[in-house]
Image (cartoon, grey):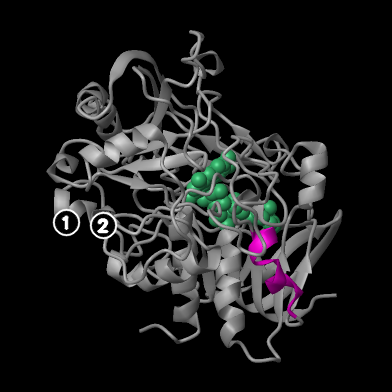
Amino acid sequence: MTAHYDVVIVGTSFAASFFLLRYLEHAPATAKVLVLERGNADSKAWQLANRRHSSIEPEDVYDNDNPRKEWYTSPGFGGNSKCWMGGTTRMMPGDFQLQSRYGVGVDWPVSYDDLEPHYTAAEQVMLISGPTDSPMPRSRPLPLPPHRFSDPDTLLKKHFPDGWYQMATARASIPTGQRGVCCASGICGLCPLDAKFTIQNGLAHLYKDPRVTLRLRSEVQTVETAAGVARGVNYIQEDIPKRDTGDLIVLAASALFNPHILLRSGFDHPLIGRRLHEQMPIYVTFDLKGVKCYNGSTVLSGLGYLFYEGEHRRDHAACMIETWSSPFAYRPDDALRLEPNRWNERLMLGFLFDDIPSDANRVTVSEHDPRRARAHFGEYSDYAKRGADQIPRMIDKLAEALPVERLVSTSLGTTAAHIQGTVVMGNDPGASVVDRHLIHHQYRNLLVLGSSSYPTASPAYPTLTVSALSLWAADHVLGRAA
Ligand SMILES: Cc1cc2nc3c(=O)[nH]c(=O)nc-3n(C[C@H](O)[C@H](O)[C@H](O)COP(=O)(O)OP(=O)(O)OC[C@H]3O[C@@H](n4cnc5c(N)ncnc54)[C@H](O)[C@@H]3O)c2cc1C
């Protein structure tokens, strides 16, 4: 039996939930919303008991062409909110205008100013902790006080007052009522104190709204279209094929699965699946002389903007630096010093460089099983690599503030754990799949939400922007846009 809904939403993580939040605020009491989620509910108790985020492993749902490049996905209610680290940086104004400011990449069809009110709203919903000063313009302070810096952060802030900031994070710095205070233990994926914002602890109430029907274990296969309109979705619920229709169809299944569903549905824009990208992450470990590390009050305690915005972006990638404040090391043998009383005089910094997406890096439908996506990733851009070439110069600069004794290791990470591109946005239907409100250029009642829309990377963590874009898109379809 096919049922008809006002809205059909695919996915239950940030992209879906922030859209649903704004939609329900303004929808009438008679509205009917169907939400389809491929995975299980996997409660916090289940996750802790099983030491896993999801009863479905990433390998169960997608193939990866390149073992040196991982893309992590945590299927189920709340998606990757179950396992994310909680870093919630805004993008910088220049990230939206790479082409017009620096002559590289493309401009986004939205600006920082367009998103600013939505960034603010998403920060209030997630109860972000962070600094009172800011590297970017803001209309409102962050809702929770900042976490305590680690000692190296304090030195860096003193030396570079406009270049170093406390981490903006969805890990609570004070009790929030729903969430405990971050313990900075480094067991962050599971977050035993439930300190970080997740859909489960922050927005689960949306899915209990009487207007909403949530179907778990419901894997969407295709979007059905006719006469230029998206009519509905075909999905498999616990091995039973089903079909429901809707006035508005919203894909929010991530940058791996949004293109997968569109390709399976026969959408033929040449850019669908293309420009898979993320930041290029490089982890650098140092020994410091007489400075104790790992004593910030959250796992990632500081953010460096010294090498982010500026004319260098004409030539090479911008970089955001993160301070790791728990003894995590990309190479576990590097985590701690072995000399007596000096175990914590060791610092790991993550250097995140933006990348210029390439058409060759992409998501396709797996040839041996169409229910699986397949990720193909060859290389980062030369632009990103030229950015990484600057690391020795950057370390020299940081050493003005830090007593660097020796460099221990430099490692290219296999993942920044961010998946971006694949259904890119733009103003030109020939050069993009969705428009500035994330509406499909041809099928005007089809939205494709999430970081799949990103035309270029930025060094910033992506999820606050995903959430802000969903609020922006919801306002537009509700006719509430300014
Ligand atoms: C280990 C880790 C750490 C991270 N840390 C950070 C961080 O500190 N800061 C940051 O900004 N970002 C971080 N991220 C990235 C962040 O998790 C993602 O940007 C964010 O989750 C994207 O939200 P989304 O709603 O678009 O997609 P997802 O969270 O990927 O959710 C997609 C949803 O769609 C569902 N779905 C998929 N396919 C189908 C289908 N066919 N049918 C039905 N449902 C489907 C999934 O089950 C899931 O619920 C991290 C990611 C990982 C893995």
Q: Is residue 23 left or right of residue 165?
A: right
Of all residues shown, which one is farthest toward the left? Answer: 311
Asked if ligand 1 lies within 8 A of label 2, the reply is no
Does residue 259 show up? no
- Do residues under tags 1 and 2 come within 8 Å of each other at their CB atoms? yes
Q: Position of residue 194 (x, y in %)?
A: 67, 51
Q: Is residue 196 above or below residue 412?
A: below
Residue in front for this viewpoint, 417 or 159 = 159
Disc sitting over residue 100 in the figure: 1
Span of residues in magenta: 199-209
* Residue at (52, 39) in percent of width and height: 299
Residue in front for this viewpoint, 162 or 107 = 162
Q: Earlier in the sequence, mark 1 or mark 2?
A: 1
Alpha carbon distance from label 1 to label 2: 7 Å
Q: Is residue 140 left or right of residue 62?
A: left
Q: Is label 2 in a helix, a strand or a loop? A: loop
Q: Position of residue 191 (x, y in %)?
A: 66, 44
Q: Looking at the rendering, in which quadrant would you find the C terminus? A: bottom left
* Residue at (66, 65) in percent of width and height: 177
Q: Is residue 310 left or right of residue 353?
A: left
Circle 2 packing at 10 Å, graded few (<14), some (14-19), many (20+), is many
Q: Amino acid at mark 2?
A: Asp
Q: Quadrant of residue 107?
A: bottom left
- On whether residue 279 falls in the magenta region, the answer is no
Q: Is label 1 in a helix, a strand or a loop? A: helix
Q: Amino acid at mark 1?
A: Ser
* Residue at (56, 54) in percent of width and height: 172
- Residue indicated by mark 2: 107
Q: Position of residue 255 (x, y in %)?
A: 52, 50
